[in-house]
Amino acid sequence: MKLKERGACTMCEVLDRIEQRGLIQGRKEGIEEGIKEGIQQMIFKMYKNGYSIKQIATVAEMSQQSVKMIIE
């Protein structure tokens, strides 16, 4: 008990912290991926609806080259 009183962590507590960090990182990456997919869907819809590459690039705040790469 002396270790616990001095603030030492058990192996289970350490593993729980590592797991929480992994979950947080995974959520962050998932959100970023979801945003990226949403932007790509928006670009495809705009292109199908007759918007020019220049207009799409302006709305998406991307270069025209990046928009072309997504469409192709």
Image: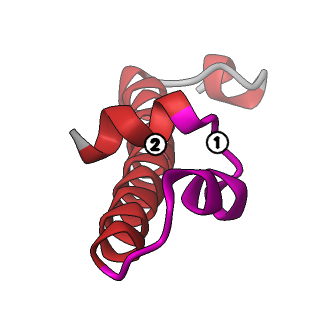
Is residue 17 shown to the viewer in this render? Answer: no
Q: Within the image, what quadrant is residue 43 found in?
A: bottom left
Name the image quarter holding residue 19.
top left
Q: Residue furthest bottom?
A: 49
The residue wearing badge 2 is 67
Return the residue nearer the eye: 51 or 19: 51
Query: Quick one: 19 or 36, which is closer to the camera?
Result: 36
Picture layout, residue 63 above or below residue 8: below
Measuring from the top left, give residue 6's x and y in whole percent. 78, 21
Camera-side residue of 13 and 34: 34
Residue at 39 percent of width and 38 percent of height: 68
Whether residue 6 is situated above or below residue 54 in the rendered picture: above
Mark 2: which amino acid?
Answer: Val
Residue displayed at 48% across by 32% down: 66
Q: Secondary structure at mark 2?
A: helix
The magenta span reads 49-64
Question: Viewed as shown, does residue 39 lie left or right of 59?
Answer: left
Image quarter where the N terminus lies is: top right
**Marker disc for residue 12:** none
Q: Residue at the location (38% across, 59% down)?
A: 34
Q: Is the residue marked by circle 1 packed among few (<14), some (14-19), or many (20+) residues within 10 Å?
A: few
Tell me whether circle 2 and circle 1 mark residues in contact (CB < 8 Å).
Answer: yes
What is the residue that sits farthest to the left in this orientation?
Answer: 72
Q: Mark on residue 62?
A: 1
| Looking at the image, residue 51 lies above or below residue 53 | below
Q: Residue 61: within the magenta? A: yes
Does the stretch in magenta take in 26?
A: no
Amino acid identity at mark 1? Met
Percent x, y of residue 3: 64, 17
Bin the neighbour count of mark 2 within 10 Å (Cα to Cα): few under 14, some 14-19, many 20 and up.
Answer: many
Q: Quadrant of the C terminus?
A: top left
